[in-house]
Amino acid sequence: MKESKEGTRERGPKSSSASSLPLILDVQDFKGDFSFDALFGNLVNDLLPSFLEEEVDSADGHGNIIGIDGLVNGHIRAPSDAAKLSQLLTAPLFPEVDSLLSLFKGACKELVDLRKQIDGRLNNLKKEVSAQDAKHRKTLTEIEKGVDGLFDSFARLDARISSVGQTAAKIGDHLQSADAQRETASQTIELIKYLMEFNGSPGDLMELSALFSDDSRVAEAASIAQKLRSFAEEDIGRQGIVGGTAVGNATAGRGLEVAVANLQDYCNELENRLLSRFDAASQRRDLSTMSECAKILSQFNRGTSAMQHYVATRPMFIDVEVMNADTRSVLGDQGSQPSPSNIARGLSSLYKEITDTVRKEAATITAVFPAPNEVMAILVQRVLEQRVTGILDKILVKPSLMNPPPVQDGGLLLYLRMLAVAYERTQELAKDLRAVGCGDLDVEGLTESLFSTYKDEYAEHEQASLKQLYQAKMDELRAESQQVSESSGTIGRSKGASISSSQQQISVTVVTEFVRWNEEAISRCTLFSSQPAMLAANVKAVFTCLLDQVSKYISEGLERARDGLSEAAALRERFVLGTSVSRRVAAAAASAAEAAAAAGESSFKSFMVAVQRCGSSVAIVQQYFANSISRLLLPVDGAHAGSCEEMSTAMSKAETAAYKGLQQCIETVMAEVERLLSSEQKSTDYRSPDDGIAPDHRPTNACTRVVAYLSRVLESAFTALEGLNKQAFLTELGNRLHKQLLSHWQKFTFNPSGGLRLKRDITEYGDFVRSFNAPSVDEKFELLGIMANVFIVAPESLSTLFEGTPSIRKDAQRFIQLREDYKSAKLATRLSSLWPSLS
């Protein structure tokens, strides 16, 4: 529904107001989503309010309805307004209903007509569409039939084309085969003609065609000669296989044999002629002629003769001056002693020159030969087998194991070092030659084969070298020790020093040198042993040499240190005197005993130093095994465990010597303690007179001397021993000291003041042994302090003294017997009644 514009026709009733617009209905308003509800809603909501407003405006001439406003506001503004309002209220609400009804009826009729018209048009369109669709389907059917026929035509055409092509291909094959057969027949005829020329008299090559003597057609002649020889040899072979007995066959066989012989002679003569031409071109550096000759010669034995001839004529293989220069560059001037460093430099220089020469030859070979890789393989093989082997034979002369060269001249070690240097440098040469190019030649395997004879006996030479080095080192150390002994032995003995002080002592530096030898030997084992099993076997053998050397060296060192302890013990025994001697003799013996004690103390310290160095040496070997040897043995089952067991066995001898020496050390210390107690302890130390003087609470002189001696001499033991060894040694020494003191105090009689002095001595001894960190020893000295109370308490208190510690009553009874009042106080009777189990 639209508003009318100027020039449009009016279809509805007009309003009384000139400004109101007529209602215009158009066919387009009923297209699409048409709804009568929407149409009527628009009429009521849009048109009727405008009609109402126009009537109100015409009634009072205002733009709004005052009456309604007044009524809405709840006031009537004037009587005139009220009259107007009453008129409006009594007037009909829709005065235009009749006109609208007629309008609606006309519109409805018109709409019905329009719908009939549209339905008619739709039926016509449907009929037209149906007719066009039927026509279109008929056309498509005809087109499909035409396409199917076209496809059939194409299929027949394709089959025809395929048939014609196959026929043409067969005809072409037949023509090609016929042409090949014709060509073969033609060539065969030509070959037969040439073969008849060679089938003359044996050795007669004078009547041959010009082809076989023309230098410009050498390649063609060589090719034909090879074909003729192959043909003749195959025919002879067939005749031999068939085993024909006919006369004709025999004649044919003999004739071909003549041809074969003549062909062979011709080929040999032609090959020699080509080689001569090849040599002449090689001297002129005419690469094109060399290449041409090489291609022709490749028809003779695949060119092997040309390849070998070229390699054999290289100056490095035939020039004597080159070989002498190799020797001078590696070994130096004649008569000079070669060294591994000089050999290494010489081989590096020589191998670099060889590599450069091979590289230059590779450029020529690539430009000349059809198969350069095969020539390079021959060249490199010749270099290794002739030039390299020649120089190795001169520098690697195997020494005799029965009569090895002396160490002063380098010994076996010099040979091994030179072998290692030569092997490393030759391996580097093999890698460089591989980089230059050597065809299919296994240059690494060939290099290994050059050293096979040396590697077979390597392990024996390595072990013999280690033994030779060890023996030389021991001889050197013995010579040094002997010089020291001769220069200072008399002075030392005059002062009472131990003879062992001038003897060779264990040196960690020497053991480190053993390990350094072994490390060098292990590096060579790694170099020469490619397989894990072989490497493990060689490493184990070399490491066993180190174990034997270290075990023997430290065992002998400990035995020498023990000899010093034994000599000191012999000196002590020599100056033990009886009781009935003069004072002068006793004084001389005491002086000699002091000298023997000094020798014992010196031997003790020397042995402790030996033990300390022994432990350090073993630690060095164990660390070396863990860091270097284990990783080489672990890949092979049982190798690592076997070496560990051998190491334990090798060190057991040294442990035995150390144990015996430590026992002797304890004997030495206890002998000196006994001497000090006997000489310094006075009978009045523990039985002071009751003269009213205050008792002396200081330790006795003997106790002070003993503790001072122990502190001095055991300082080296505290430093040398570690762990369980230290604890066991000090525990044994503390027990021996405890036993020695008990035995010593049994010689004295004690009064109460002497008991206090004894208690002070025991405290001093206990404080010292506490540094041993031995709980069992500390407990024994604590019990000694308790037992010393038997000299201090009154007789009647003895029974209650050991109530808390009944285990020491037996030792306490022995102490009680040393009381000064033991007999006067009748302590034996009293104790037997109190402790009947001890009576």
Image (cartoon, grey):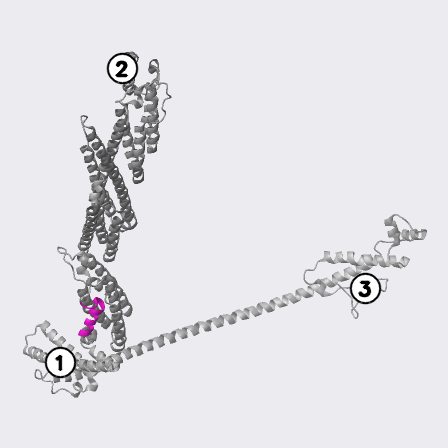
Q: Compared with residue 603, is residue 704 higher up or lower down, i.e. above or below?
A: above
Q: Residue at x 29, y 68 (%)?
A: 435
Task: Give the residues in magenta.
Answer: 320-334
**Left or right side of 132 for 354:** left
Of circles 2 and 1, which is in front?
A: 2
In the displayed structure, 575 sits above or below 285; it is above
Residue of label 1: 263
Check disc 3: other Cα within 10 Å, few if <14, some if 14-19, many if 20+: some
Residue underneath mark 2 = 837
Q: Is residue 717 above or below residue 539?
A: above
For marks 3 and 2, give the one nearer the viewer: 2
Q: Amino acid at mark 1?
A: Leu
Residue 401 image point, x, y percent: 14, 55
* Residue identified by numbered label 3: 21
How much space separates mark 2 and mark 1, taking CA atoms?
130 Å
State yes or no: discs 3 and 1 in contact (Cβ < 8 Å): no
Image quarter for residue 193? bottom left
**Disc 3 to disc 2, how far (Cα)?**
153 Å
